[in-house]
């Protein structure tokens, strides 16, 4: 997906560019900065010394050397001084400058640490919000895969006041075993031809159904496919294709595959991402999931979390993915 939240050692990520949370002298320090320099080897420091330092909020690029990337983009984040010294604007500038430099270098993928959230003391939750929002704004006009690398998953779990409500909703709705055969919001007519939960296949009228009367004619009706339903919903919402797939955190190439192939079988996370982008209610979400052979389940924690956001009419996919990440669930969206 265009924005991925991952927990990994940033020095081991394979992408076009990784971002180093550097100091203004561009001399190897501690934390992420020191780790990147150690992994890249001494030639990285030698090139950094030729750059003449870097100001807060700006970015400069070097080679990747022994790292699994073409470039290291060095940016200097602000030190936290209580939030009244333009820290947010400076931190936002770090991400914007790094993204524009990566674009200038022809990068298709970039990995960020949470800049300033270490020894510079920036509150993790606020740093994450700025990172996600700034990258999302950039991706509205540009195609690039962005990784936001978080070392400590639990740090995000309490980064938003939403989580107390989410945890309460999970306590009330999540069950260890799913006792219902069909989605809880489907009526009898819709449930007759629905598969059991987890079944991945296309929805169609059953070829044969037991019936006492032999005179009932057998017939088949071609149902609307997921792809056809998606395109219809986009038109009904008055959205452009690009607006929809970007709001869904979906790669442009994947959307092209779905548009060109009426029989395309998406993943559940892809379907849910489009439901969020289209701001569908729970019944409409159930309907679109069924088109792809899926259903929401109270025994799947990720489904319960997504259901909470839909019921709350909160269609911010990045906030949803933050919650899913905190609970170690699959994120919404996909790449081709």
Image (tube, rainbow, N blue to C red):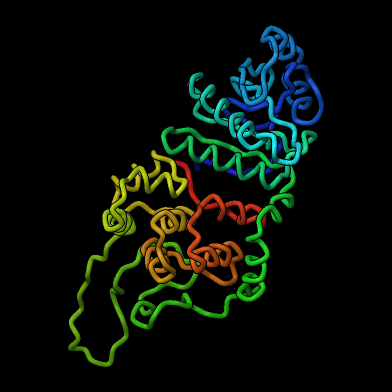
Tell me if 298 is positioned left or right of 222 in this view: right
Say above or below: 269 vs 210. Answer: above
Say above or below: 31 vs 327. Answer: above
Q: Quadrant of residue 24?
A: top right
Q: Residue furthest front?
A: 84
Q: Quadrant of residue 255?
A: top left
Residue that appears at 35% across and 51% down? 264
Question: In the depicted view, which residue is nearer to us: 229 or 307?
Answer: 307
Q: Quadrant of residue 77?
A: top right
Number of callouts in the render?
Answer: 0
Q: Residue furthest top?
A: 50
Task: Where is residue 4? Give x, y as percent.
Answer: 57, 43
Say above or below: 96 vs 240. Answer: above
Task: Where is residue 278? Give x, y as percent.
Answer: 38, 57
Tell me if 271 is positioned left or right of 4 in this view: left
Task: Where is residue 145? Give x, y as percent.
Answer: 51, 35
Task: Where is residue 281? Give x, y as percent.
Answer: 42, 67
Residue that appears at 73% across and 49% down? 155
In the rendered image, the quadrant that contains the C terminus is top left
Tell me if 261 is positioned left or right of 300 in this view: left
Residue that appears at 78% across and 22% down? 38
Say above or below: 272 vs 106. Answer: below
Residue that appears at 36% across and 63% down? 291
């Amino acid at each position: 997906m265009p924005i991925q939240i991952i927990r990994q050692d940033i020095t081991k990520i394979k992408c076009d560019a990784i971002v180093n949370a550097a100091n203004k002298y561009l001399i190897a320090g501690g934390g992420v900065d020191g780790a990147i320099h150690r992994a890249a080897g001494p030639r990285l420091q030698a090139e950094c010394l030729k750059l003449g330092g870097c100001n807060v909020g700006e970015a400069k690029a070097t080679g990747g050397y022994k790292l699994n990337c073409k470039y290291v983009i060095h940016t200097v984040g602000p030190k936290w001084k209580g939030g009244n010294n333009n820290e947010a604007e400076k931190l936002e500038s770090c991400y914007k400058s790094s993204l524009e430099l990566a674009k200038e270098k022809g990068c298709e993928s970039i990995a960020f640490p949470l800049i300033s959230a270490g020894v510079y003391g920036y509150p993790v939750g606020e740093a994450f919000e700025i990172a996600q929002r700034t990258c999302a704004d950039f991706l509205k006009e540009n195609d690039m895969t962005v990784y936001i690398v978080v070392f400590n998953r639990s740090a995000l779990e309490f980064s938003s006041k939403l989580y107390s409500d989410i945890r309460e909703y999970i306590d009330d709705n999540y069950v260890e075993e799913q006792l219902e055969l069909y989605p809880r919001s489907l009526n009898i007519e819709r449930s007759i031809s629905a598969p059991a939960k987890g079944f991945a296949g296309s929805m169609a009228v059953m070829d044969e159904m037991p019936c006492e009367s032999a005179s009932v004619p057998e017939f088949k009706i071609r149902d609307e496919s997921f792809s056809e339903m998606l395109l219809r919903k986009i038109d009904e919402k008055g959205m452009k294709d690009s607006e929809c797939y970007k709001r869904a955190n979906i790669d442009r190439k994947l959307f092209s595959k779905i548009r060109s192939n009426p029989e395309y079988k998406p993943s559940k996370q892809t379907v849910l991402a489009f439901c969020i982008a289209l701001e569908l209610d729970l019944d409409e979400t159930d309907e679109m999931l069924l088109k792809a052979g899926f259903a929401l389940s109270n025994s799947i924690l990720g489904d319960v979390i997504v259901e909470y956001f839909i019921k709350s009419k909160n269609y911010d996919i990045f906030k949803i993915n933050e919650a899913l990440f905190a609970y170690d669930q699959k994120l919404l969206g996909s790449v081709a």
